[in-house]
Image: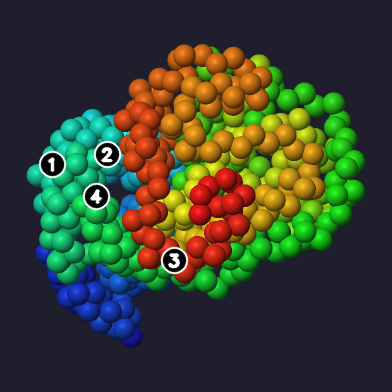
Amino acid sequence: MARDPAADRDALRAIQVSAQAGQHAQAAALAEAARADGLEHPLIYNVLALQRELAGKLSEAEELLRHAVRLAPGDLASRNALGLCLLRLERPQEALAQFESLLAANPSLAFLHTSRGSALFALGRVGDAEASFQRALELDERQPVALAGLANIASSRGAYAAARGWAEKALQLLPGYPEAILSLASTDLGERVPWQAQSRMRDFLARDDLAPLFRAYANGLIGDALDAQSRTDDAFAAYSQCNEILREVHGSRFQSLPGALQYARSLAEYLRRTPPSAWRTPAQRAGHLDPASKHYFILGFPRSGTTLLEVVLEGHEQVVSLEENESLIDGIREFMQRPEDLDRLLQAPAASLDALRQAYWRRAAQAGARVAGKVFVDKNPLNTLKLPLIARLFPNAKILFACRDPRDVVLSCFRHRFRMSAPIFELLTVQGAAAYYDAVMRVLLECTRLLPLEVCLVRHEDLVTEFAREMRRVCDFLGIEWMPAMGDFALRTQHRETLTPSTAQLVRGLNTEGLGHWHRYRRQLEPVLPVLEPWIEQFYYDA
């Protein structure tokens, strides 16, 4: 039957009016009715996707938005919404591709620069994100999302006065905007008024229009506020609520597949069964010269002090560092998809290994590392699992292994909100974090037995309490000279391209606030202490 164009226009107008009025449930009901009636239009799928997002069904939202794009490939709203959905699904590289494709054809649209900034921030390209937000404001100063993005960057850097200013400007333009309110709560915490952050987040959670991710982040900030007031039982409950929501939102991506914990355990078992003689023959090299004069890896586990070690070393005039870039990904795909793939790594011809070395240096350069003639430091805590590949590709590289009291590590991983990935999904419960820590450390132990590695253990507690002594020891190991400028890391941290959960702490300089924090949560950690006990002893901590 032929459709009635006038009736279709009326149906779409009703959907749009409800959506613009913030009546999302009514708009979604109208959209469902229109779709059931056979009406196909991008607006319908955009509204239905928003309803799925508010319900935490991000994968369903993605499918609806992809259908909208298929209906109208040139529809900016649908493609921008798809990019934002991909961001919430923790797929920022795909989101960035969407936004940059749109910007190529529409460079004067401020909201696209804002969306691009959000994707760049999620990728850790903070300087580029900041520039993109600023460009959006140059084109249209009334861009609340760009203002909130600048607030988030400033808060993450510990620039709390600037963060508050940006967030308040955003809220003047768009009252109730979630990202701006979350930035204000982070700023409250940074300015040591946790009760204000707690109150702000309680009011925030009273809203009935919050997507699950915002509810998760709000509970996490409440946990931080309660922790700052030494209300540890309540704080732990808030962190648990935050992480449970995150498990629900991301569970469909990670629970149906073999997880990071299973992989780490399988790798440790494979290495345990491997005789040392298998790794005694050094890898043959095809004459390729590494561009860096010296090459080091900083490994460990998340929240173990790797960032502090890296930013201190960055203060040396000859050191270039790269933080948590997947430069080894080509080798991983070739030889570490499964533990058994390492059999092929041992037999790989020199030319194949040399090609992977070149791919590594190429990816480092693409990430901005200018390593020619420099001392190159590659920092990625969970590259601990990649030690077999590192030892084969770079047998002359030295390893700095950062460690911290395992109880503090597990607690800190549980408390912090990271960009989601398979390993981070394991950290959403104390039990999962402890089990994953144990598995990664078992891989480390087997690697030190099997591989010809030069490893220097750096305990975080020693670094923050005996800084000069420890850094001179580290410099001696690396073969570089200690320079006083290396101690001025707090100022450098304010301008770093990459932000981590440690950044706002590091701009305050050395501090011992986090040492022994686990004692306050002893009761909650009690079930996992037997799992951590071997590593407490291994790394010389008191039981």
* Label 3: element kind: helix
Amino acid at pointer 2: Ser
- Of residues 44 and 177, the one drawn nearer to the viewer in this rendering: 177
Image: 117 above or below 56: above
Image: 513 above or below 208: above
Q: Is residue 24 visible?
A: yes
Alpha carbon separation for disc pair 3 and 1:
42 Å
Display coloring: rainbow
In the drawing, what numbered circle is on residue 168?
A: 1
Amino acid at pointer 1: Glu
Q: Is residue 400 left or right of residue 249?
A: right
* Label 1: element kind: helix
Q: Around disc 2, counting alpha carbons within 10 Å, would you say few (fewer than 14), some (14 to 19), or many (20 or more)?
A: many
Where does label 2 land, which residue?
Answer: 155
Disc with the residue nearer the chain's start (3 vs 1): 1
Alpha carbon separation for disc pair 1 and 2:
13 Å
Alpha carbon separation for disc pair 4 and 2:
17 Å
Disc with the residue nearer the chain's start (3 vs 2): 2
x, y percentage for residue 341? Answer: 78, 57
Disc with the residue nearer the chain's start (4 vs 3): 4
Amino acid at pointer 4: Ala
Where does label 3 land, which residue?
Answer: 526
Disc with the residue nearer the chain's start (4 vs 1): 1
